[in-house]
Structure formats: C-alpha cells, structure tokens
Amino acid sequence: RNLHYNLVDAQREYPDALAIGIDERTVIAVDGNWFSVHGESYVVMIDAEPQSTQQECFYFLKDGDGYDLKGRFPMRKQRATEPFAQCRRREPVEGQE
C-alpha cells in the first residue's frame, strides 16, 4: 500500500529515531541489537544519523537482509548490484536548527 511515505513525517518529528516501515506479507525478527527481514515484500527505513548528522539515508531491505540497530548499518543477504541506500543532505527543520 506504499504507506512508507508517512515515515518521512514521523522521522522529522522524532529526528533521533529510526523510522521503520514494514510492508504487507513481511516481518522483522529482532534478536538483541539486530533484526532480519523475512517475507515477500520489503522493509523501508529512514535513518537521519547513519554516520553524519548532515544526511539521511533511505534503506530498502528485502528477505534475508538485516540491520544492526546499535551500529546503525544494514547488511545484505548477498552482494547486490542495485544501490543499498539512497542518501541525501538533510534539510534543517524549522525550530530544530
């Protein structure tokens, strides 16, 4: 249903948090500081602070991919040819500058 676009607003409201959207027929299995993706569709994440507070990254995780919640980095099930993340410079939010 592509409701993951709502994550942008949620992430802007809570800039220190990870925004995670789980599509239909998809689940995440959390084990400590790690989760893995399972299912037919994907998980979308927005991380405003991956390595730098000056950018935000959009991750599209598929079946078998995972994410380290403490280190804030994704892992692919196998090497892929498409980009793992789409990052862009973060624009200041009014009142949070």
Image: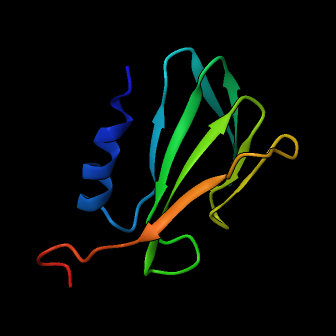
- Residue 32 visible in the shown view: no
Q: Position of residue 94 (x, y in %)?
A: 12, 75
x then y, percent, for residue 41: 60, 22
User: Could you tell me if residue 54 is visible in this image?
Assistant: yes
Q: In the depicted view, which residue is nearer to us: 73 or 69?
A: 73
Relative placement, left or right, of 61 versus 80 is: left
Find residue 70 and report its image quarter: bottom right
Residue at the image position 45 percent from the left and 67 percent from the top:
88
**Viewer-closest of 76 and 22:** 76
* Up/down of 32 relative to 39, above or below: below
- The quadrant in which residue 31 appears is top right
- Quadrant (top left/top right/bottom left/bottom right) for the N terminus: top left
- In the image, is 86 to the left or to the right of 74? left
Q: Is residue 71 above or below residue 54?
A: above
Residue at the far left in the pictured view: 95
Q: Is residue 25 left or right of residue 80?
A: left
The residue located at (71%, 46%) in the rendering is: 82
- Tell me: 4 left or right of 33: left
Q: Residue at x 38, y 36 (%)?
A: 4
The total number of labels drawn is 0
